Image (tube, grey):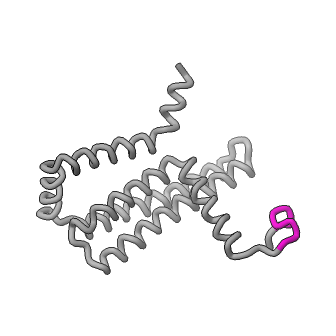
Amino acid sequence: MVPDWKTKGKRRTLADSFGDAARGILFAVKTERNMRIHLTAAVYVLFFSPFLGVTRSEYGVLLLTIAMVIAAEAFNTAIEMLCDYAQKSYNPLIGKTKDIAAGAVLVCAVFAAFVGIAVLWRPEAILALLITIVTNPLYLVLSILSLILAFFLHFQRAMRRAGKAS
């Protein structure tokens, strides 16, 4: 049951639910550095996988693995926010709860890395891709720019804090 303060007496639609979900995901992306790291890794994996000859079933495994990590990070964020709301001062049980949630994300991320290695480890194809990037100026510039963009996306908040401190 949705509280009346949210619905204002109106019946909620499926679009309302999807809007709430999208806001939640965007909030997690904006506020959680690790969510941005996971999403960036997913983008790179999905971008480079066609060059490595990934099959449809391997794409399925990669997509499920990516979804598992993103969902785990979202659950972790929700649990941490709820714990912070429920307990303003330090509580060992809340601390353990947050540690367990973070540990679940770590397990998912480590196993996602194993899945990525199992699916994408093709030394000849990786070498051919690297040679293509390095020998083609456009690909090289785009690769460098994407890495710079990824860096700024991940560390924007730390850079803002450093700028405010000085």
Q: Residue furthest top?
A: 166
Image spot of residue 114 (x, y percent): 31, 64
Residue drawn at x 39%, y 44% is: 149
Residue for point 63% across, 57% down: 79
Residue 80 horizontal side relative to residue 42, left or right: right
In this picture, which residue range is highlighted in magenta?
3-10
Q: Residue at x 58, y 59 (%)?
A: 25
As drawn, 123 above or below 95: below
x, y percentage for residue 116? Answer: 30, 65
Q: What residue occupies the far bottom of the structure in this picture?
A: 57
Lateral position of residue 1 relative to residue 133, left or right: right
- Left or right: where 10 falls relative to 38: right
Magenta-colored stretch includes residue 93: no
Whether 28 is drawn above or below 69: the answer is above
- Tell me where residue 14 sits by quadrant: bottom right
Q: Count up the numbered dots.
A: 0
Residue 39 in the figure: left or right of residue 59 = right
Residue sitting at x 39%, y 42% = 151
Looking at the rendered image, the quarter that the N terminus falls into is: bottom right
101 vs 81, nearest the viewer = 81
- 149 and 108: which is toward the camera: 149
Pick the residue in front: 133 or 97: 133
Whether the magenta-drawn stretch holds residue 8 is answered as yes
Pinpoint residue 27: horizontal percent, then vertical percent.
60, 53
Percent across and percent down for residue 145 are 32, 44
